[in-house]
Image: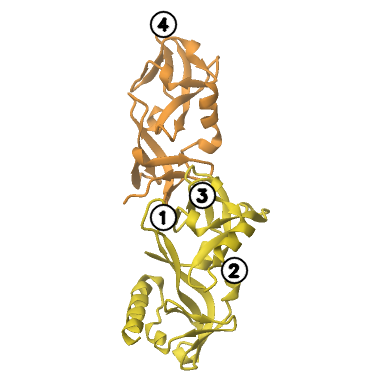
Chain colours: A yellow, B orange
Amino acid sequence: MRLMRTSEITKRPVVTMAGEDVAQVKDVVYAADGGSVVAFTLAGRGVFAGPLKQGLSWGSVAALGADAVMIRDETVLEPVKAMLSASGGKGSSGDVLGSQVLSDAGIDLGVVRDVIVSVDMPGRSGAGSSCDVVGYEIEASEALGTQGELVLIPLPDTIAASGEHLMVPASAKEFVGRDLAGFGAAIEAFRAQLEGTA
Amino acid sequence: MLFSKANRHKVVSSSTAATVAKVSGFVVDPVSRSVVAVRLKKAEKGEFLRWADLVAFGADAVTVTDDSVIGDGGPDVSALAGKAHRVLGKRVLTSGGDELGKVDDVDFDPETGTITSLVLGKGATAEVAGDRLIGIGSYAVVVRETP
């Protein structure tokens, strides 16, 4: 399992196992419930290259590493339109970025600046892999006592989102992290606590 | 033997004992993980010597029966000889998408041409076993991720 900011995934090259960079990630496409990454839209490589008509669905990703998105070969790319209707994806991260995070106690925790995903690649082939949204990087509000700073806030498995607000349990506040290194443990502790109280 | 050591080796004809060319590079096939041809300079008949056509890759010289084996290497060698398939200086990515460094040198078995390891980084900071090689493309050399 590995945590990443989705802003770091965009612009990452898409590289075949033969070592060719066939595209780069343009945007991240989330599942309709916002809980996972289902696909990437792509742009060509190079300064003047525009968006591509081909996209990359999560199921075709062989690996998502720190420096590249690996795919078997170019044939796994598919037309963006068909891909989006099949995945039920709802579009880009623009939907969440800038949204206000409210605790269920009605307190403004801050504004979303980045989405944190957990990448799990159990098999070599990419089978059974997942890319779940596990947290947000938010610009903290007064309520967190570190106003204006970027902090990481863990998310429960499912979350209510309206495009205007994102609703998180009030206890999420206690599991706020500062860097990705220790954030994995915070997410687990937070989710364990939620299950315990449910 | 390292590419850096083997480079500029003389290619000597065993029938005339004359130097017919000099080694200037290597053509590597990522599928067989081996050197399939030697790139030459100062040769009259062509730019390539297929690995199968050389007699020995010795510590001091490469020997061939005569210079008739030097040529264009054929289609399979030409396909791998382009700049896009060059190994030296290229970034190394694992199949997991992580960069390990850049290829500084390559170690190969002079008996068989098999790539034994990739030497990464200036001053050989790391080595990747040759059998991990998966692909050599214009963007990167791809190697199998270690479990």
Which mark's residue is nearer the viewer, 1 or 4?
1
Give residue B46's position: percent from left, percent from top.
55, 18
Name the element at disc 2: loop
> In this view, which residue lies farthest toward the top?
B15
What residue is shown with label 2? A92
Few, some or many C-alpha atoms within 10 Å of disc 4 (few <14, some 14-19, many ≥20)?
Answer: few
Residue that numbered label 1 is attached to = A127
Image depth: mark 1 or mark 2 in front:
1
- Name the subunit of mark 4: B
Q: Chain of mark 2?
A: A
Kind of residue indicated by mark 2? Ser
| Amino acid type assigned to the residue bearing label 4 in the image | Ser
Classify A65 as above or below A95: above
Q: Residue at x 50, y 80 (%)?
A: A138
- The residue to which callout 4 is attached is B15
One can see residue A68 in this view? no
The answer for which chain carries disc 3 is A
Q: Quadrant of the N terminus of chain B?
A: top left
Q: Residue at x 34, y 82 (%)?
A: A195
What is the CA distance from the residue labelled 1 to the residue labelled 3?
Answer: 18 Å
